[in-house]
Amino acid sequence: MSGIKKLAQQTIWYGLSSMAARLINYLLTPYLTYKFTTAQYGEMSIIYAFFPFMNVLFSYGMETTFFRFSQGNDNKSVHNTASTSLIISTLVLSAILLSITGPISHMLNISAHPEYLYLCVGIIATDAITIIPFAKLRQEGRPVKFALIKIGGILCNMACIYFLLSYAPHWVKTHPGNFSESYFTGAWAVGYVLVANLIQNLLILLLLNKELTSFQWKPDRALWVSMLRYGLPLIIVGMAGTINETFDRIMLGWWAPVKGVEAAKAEVGIYSACYKLSIFISLAVQAFKMGAEPFFFKLSTQEDAPKHYARVMKFFVIILCGMYLVVMLYLDIWKHFIQNKAMWVGLSVVPLLLLANIFLGIYYNLSVWYKLGNRTMAGAWITIVGAIITLAINYWGIPHFSYVASAWATLVCYGSMMVISYLWGQKVYPVPYAINRLLLYLLIAVLLGKANEWISLPNSFPTIVHLLKSTVFLLIFVSLLYTLEKEEIKKLPLIGKWVR
C-alpha cells in the first residue's frame, strides 16, 4: 500500500505543478483581453487553435508510447529510440510546414501576417523536442524540477508579453525617432505573443539541457516499429480530439453569421474569452491528464488496480462538481476575469462549457481500459465519433447560432464520448465505478447552479447579499458531500485526520 501511496503522491505533484503552470498562464487572460480588441483576441485564438493539430502530428503519440513501453522493456533503449525518432521527425515536419506557410495563413485568415507562421513553426518544433525530456522527469519521479521548469517557462512568457505589449511600446513612444520604433506597432500585437512563447520554449530547452543530452543516437529498429504501431493510432485520437477541443474556433472564423473577416474574428474572441471561464475545470482536467497516465500504467500491475481506478474517478468527479459550482455561483465575479466588457455578451455559454469539460475529464479517466489493453484504435474510434458530432453540429449550427452552436457541439461531443467509453470499457476491462453516486453529484451540482439563477434578487441589493446567497448553495453541496462521503474522506491524507 505504501508504494501506491507514494505513486499517488507523485501523481498529485505532477498534476498540481501542471495545474499551477496553466493557472499562471491563464492569468494573462485579463491582461490580453484588456490590451487586445475583440478581433485581435479572436485572431490570436485562431492561431492557437492551430497549434494542437500540429502538436499531435509532431508528437505522434510518442509520450504515451514512452510510458507504455517503459513497462517491461529496457528503459534506456526506449529513451534512445523515442528521442532519436522525435528529433528527426521534428526536423522533417518543420521543413514541410515552412514550405506551405502561404496556404496555411490563408486558411487561418491571417494572410496579412504570414510571418506569424514562422514563429509558430519554431514554437511547435521546440514543444515536440521537449516531450521526452519532460516524460523522463515524470517517469523518474522528479516533480520538483518538472514543476520549476514548467512554472519558470510560464513566468518568462508573462514577463516577455508584458515587455513587448506594454513596456517597449511606452518606451518607444517617449523616445521618438529611436531605431526600434518600427518594431513595436499595434498591428503586430498578436506577433508579440508568439515571440514571447518562442522565448519561453527556448528557455525551457536550456533548462532541460541535461535531459535533452542524456540519450544516445542508438535507436532500436525493432522496438521503434513496435512503438510506432502502438503510437500512430494515437494520432487519429489526437487529431479527432483536437477537432473536438479547438477546431470550433477555426470554423467560427469561417462561418460566423456576421459580415467581414474582422467581425468573424470578434465572434471567435468572444467565444474564446468566455471559454476561459471554464478555467478551473480545464485546469483540473489537464492536471489529471498530466499526472494520471504514468500513475495508471504503474498501478496496472496491482491486483486491485480497478478498485483504485474507481476511487480516483469518484474523487475526481467530486472535485469537478465543486469547481463547477464555484464558477456558476459566482459568475458575476468571474466575468471580470474578462476585462473587455464587449465579450460578456457570450456568458450564456459558460454553463455548457463547464459541463462539457467535466464530461471530458470523466472520459480521460475512463480511457484507462484501452490504453492498458493496447487497444488504442478503440480510443481512436470513440474520438472520431466525437469529431463527427463536433463537425456536424458546428457545420449546421454556426451559420445560424454562431458560438452558441459551438458550445452545444462541445457538450454533446464530450457527453457522447464519455458514454461510449464507459459502455465499451466495462465489457473489456470492468472497473467498479460508483455510477449512481457520480450521476447524483453531477445532478446536484447542476440543480444548485440553476437554483441560484432561479432565485434571483433585485439588483438594488448590496453585492454582499448576492454573494451570501451563492455561498448558501455552495455550503449545501459541501454538507451533502460530507454526509455521503464522510467515511471516505477520513481515509484521505492530510485532510482525513480533521474529519470526525
Image (tube, helix red, strand yellow):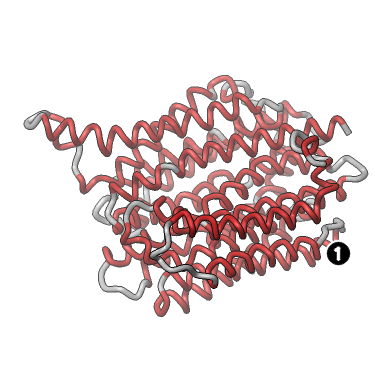
Q: Which residue is at the front of the view, 433 or 191? A: 433
Residue 222 visible somewhere in the drawing: no
> Residue, x 72% and y 67% (percent of image)?
419
Q: Which residue is at the front of the view, 213 or 206? A: 206
Tag count: 1
Q: Quadrant of the N terminus?
A: top right
Horizontal side of 293 relative to 325 (left or right) equals: right
Q: Secondary structure at mark 1?
A: helix
Return the residue found at the far left.
177
Q: Quadrant of the C terminus?
A: top right
- The residue identified by callout 1 is 427
Where is residue 274? Give x, y as percent.
44, 59
Horizontal side of 470 relative to 370 (left or right) equals: left
Where is residue 165? Give x, y as percent.
27, 39
| 258 versus 497 height, above or below | below
Q: Quadrant of the rendered structure where residue 460 is?
A: bottom left
Horizontal side of 321 relative to 3 (left or right) equals: left
Where is residue 292? Give x, y as percent.
71, 43
Q: Quadrant of the rendered structure where residue 69 is?
A: top right
> Residue, x 41% and y 30% (percent of image)?
156
Where is residue 386? Give x, y as percent.
61, 67
